[in-house]
Image: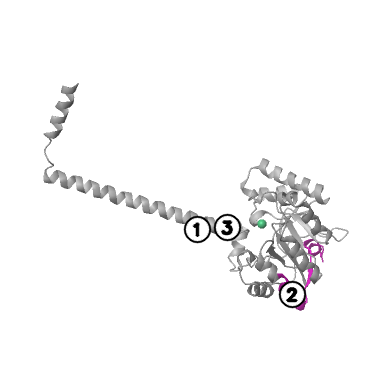
């Protein structure tokens, strides 16, 4: 064995240094390898940046852009930043109440000089009562789209919303984009929400706002099959990223028209600070602030 190893060592020591052309080729190969490695690394970094950017755009804020349906594309093509829509199709019932549809409601243009303010994502143990205090002071009723899991966690807060005379709707259990989930997941989400709203608030859910405002045909049909109406919004001034209450209130006041549904969020200091200004200015402009249900009830 020792003899064998020493033979190998001797063999290796005999190895001649590389001849210039061979060394040059090796160097070229090395450079080529380095070049392609750099290209792959660059592509990888670019992909990471693109994914990070997409993640920010789509998921970091509460309400992501609408899915790319033909209808939405057409709507967004009009250059509007806020999600302004034509009057929804609300068919009057004999008792002058709005009728459940499998369509999306963004506003009710029949409701002259009325505006509905809505708050998403609560109830919160610390924030909700602050919003309720402002609404009480201004003597205004609003609609809160609550998450089932938070109703379970903060049932007393949820009850205080209802007891103050506000309207509540479901914003799903987890705040997952339900149109990306399978039918079983969606069904469980709805059933859990229906059960918790019934148990804690004795409320049969009628209004539903999908997380991120995302929906597809199947989800709309599911919402309808659970006896709930899909409610989105017609005014969204991105309060979740606003840092100046005056600017936020101004943007909303300048946008609002009769029959609008305004999207706001709980747990946002800027929104909370802007709320009294929004209410006061809208009232000065002659708008009556109502719940979504009241807004929809105007059928002629
Ligand atoms: Zn939300």
Q: How is the image coloured?
A: one colour
State how far apart marks 1 and 3 are (Cα).
Answer: 10 Å
> Image quarter for residue 244?
bottom right
Residue at the disc numbered 1: 53
Residue 3, image x, y percentages: 15, 22
Residue at the disc numbered 3: 60
State how far apart marks 1 and 2 are (Cα).
Answer: 36 Å
Q: Earlier in the sequence, mark 1 or mark 3?
A: 1
Element on which disc 2 rests: helix
Element on which disc 3 rests: helix
Residue 239, image x, y percentages: 64, 66
Q: Let me know if residue 184 appears in the view.
A: yes
Residue at the disc numbered 2: 282
Q: Residue furthest right?
A: 95
The magenta span reads 275-300
Q: For this view, does 2 lie left or right of residue 116? A: left
Q: For this view, does 238 lie left or right of residue 159? A: left
Q: Earlier in the sequence, mark 1 or mark 2?
A: 1
């Amino acid at each position: 064995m020792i003899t064998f190893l020493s033979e190998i060592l001797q063999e290796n020591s005999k190895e001649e240094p590389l001849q210039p052309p061979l060394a040059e080729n090796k160097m070229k190969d090395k450079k080529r390898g380095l070049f392609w490695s750099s290209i792959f690394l660059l592509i990888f970094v670019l992909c990471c940046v693109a994914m990070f950017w997409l993640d920010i755009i789509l998921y970091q804020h509460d309400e992501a852009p609408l899915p790319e349906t033909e209808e939405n594309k057409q709507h967004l093509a009009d250059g509007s930043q806020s999600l302004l829509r034509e009057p929804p199709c609300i068919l009057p019932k004999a008792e002058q109440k709005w009728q459940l549809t499998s369509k999306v409601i963004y506003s009710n243009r029949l409701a002259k000089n009325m505006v509905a303010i809505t708050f998403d994502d609560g109830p919160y143990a610390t924030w909700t009562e602050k919003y309720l205090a402002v609404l009480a002071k201004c003597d205004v009723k609003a609609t809160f789209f609550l998450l089932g899991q938070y109703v379970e966690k903060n049932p007393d807060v949820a009850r205080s919303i209802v007891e103050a005379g506000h309207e509540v709707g479901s914003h799903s259990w987890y705040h997952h984009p339900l149109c990306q989930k399978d039918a079983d997941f969606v069904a469980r989400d709805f059933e859990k929400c229906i059960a918790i709203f019934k148990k804690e608030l004795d409320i049969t859910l009628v209004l539903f706002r999908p997380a991120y405002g995302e929906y597809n045909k199947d989800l709309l049909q599911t919402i309808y099959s659970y006896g709930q109406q899909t409610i989105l919004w017609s005014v969204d001034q991105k309060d979740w990223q606003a840092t100046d209450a005056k600017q936020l209130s101004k943007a909303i006041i300048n946008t609002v028209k009769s029959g609008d549904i305004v999207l706001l969020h709980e747990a946002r200091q800027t929104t909370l600070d802007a709320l009294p200004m929004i209410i006061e200015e809208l009232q000065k402009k002659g708008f009556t602030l109502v719940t979504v249900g009241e807004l929809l009830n105007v059928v002629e």
